[in-house]
Image (cartoon, grey):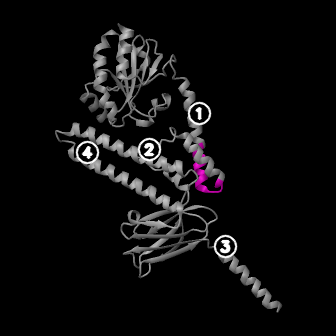
Amino acid sequence: MRYQLIIFLVLCFLLACHQKKINFSINGNIDNGVNKKIYLKKLGQEKDSIVDSLKISDDGSFSFSGYTDNKSFFSLSLSNDESVNLIVSPGDDIRIKGQWGDFSDSYNVAGSRESECLEMIHDKMNSYYKTVDSLGKIFRHKRDSVEYQALKSELDSAFYNSFNKAKNELIGFIKSNPGSFASMVALYQQRDLRNYMIDWEKNYNLIKKIDSILYQKHPESDAVIVFHEQVNELKKKISLRREKEKLLQKGKKAPEISLPGTSGETVDLSSLQGKYVLLDFWASWCAPCRRENPELLEVYNRFSDKGFEIFQVSLDRDKRAWMKAIEEDSLPWINVSDLKMWNSVVVPNYNISQIPTNYLLDKKGRIIKKDVEISELDSLLTQFLN
């Protein structure tokens, strides 16, 4: 009797251990995926780890089960390198359908609120990228046509409308779901290789709120910890930027700029003291900057012989593109660049986060005003130089 009791207790212990190791399931069906390999991976900050793998059954079905201590990121990856990301919580019974060869675009998920939100974000971004690709194809096809300039304005407008729509939808989702892991994912969606869809500095209060909620609810999550560290770094960056902004206020001396001009010679901003100077940051690839140049030229032609100069700093990388833009726009004033784009020394010194950006300086090199509109510039110079 005692022996049977020991066996019973051992079996109960083993059953309890087994139950502990399984607290979520993922079941699904992949069309045209019979006998193909599918992997369940846990996503990590440094590398992913394979949790399990199997062959898809003859009827296209598959089934995984596993254990997670807390809400975590997983992926279902096919042997043809297609994958779908999931947010798995303890107790989730996830059901997913998709198609081999188009898995990431065709999949549909249920049984996990977080994973359903992730699918929604994926669909929104997929729609945005398809629109951008379509506009890009039109742009490249029409680049050498006579109607290019008129069409370019329409394409620019269509692109920004599409971008703003996608960005506002992401922000709306985040505001409605501040405690969701999917909101954290939404914040990482990219507009291009360099920029997030949502500007973290401009939306710092929203990001700080998301961080506060997630870090309080999930302090053990690696993803949340990394996000929390990034938000802390952002806080420091904003604080540093504000300190620098104090040095760029009205009446402060503009920081020195010494960069190569178009002929390679170094030109100093301070060499223009004695004149009113428009310090203008631009680039050949910046459409709003290029649209502004003809208006600047009109102002320059009216006041250049009265003590006015323009000192343009380009955030270009390609010298040929920079020189071509200067020639095409007929720019007679001083142009300098270290050809380092956003890594230029002027970016941190002048807190540049977007272009065009400008500063109007007085004869002693002191800041009169930042981001002066062209019409206002004309009015100010009329007041100062007439």
Q: Which residue is outermost to the bottom?
A: 1
- The mark lying in front, picked from 1 and 3, is 3
Report which quarter residue 283 is drawn in.
Answer: top left
The answer to which of marks 4 and 1 sits earlier in the sequence is 4
Residue at image position (61%, 71%) is 23
User: What span is colored magenta in the figure?
Assistant: 217-231
Q: Which residue is disc 2 drawn over?
A: 195
User: Gap in Å between the C-alphas at discs 1 and 3?
Assistant: 46 Å
Q: Which residue is disc 3 drawn over?
A: 20
User: Gap in Å between the C-alphas at discs 3 and 4?
Assistant: 57 Å
Q: Position of residue 322 (x, y in %)?
A: 31, 32
User: Gap in Å between the C-alphas at discs 4 and 2?
Assistant: 21 Å
- The disc labelled 2 sits on which kind of residue? Asn
Q: Which residue is disc 1 drawn over?
A: 239
- The disc labelled 3 sits on which kind of residue? Lys
- The mark lying in front, picked from 3 and 2, is 3
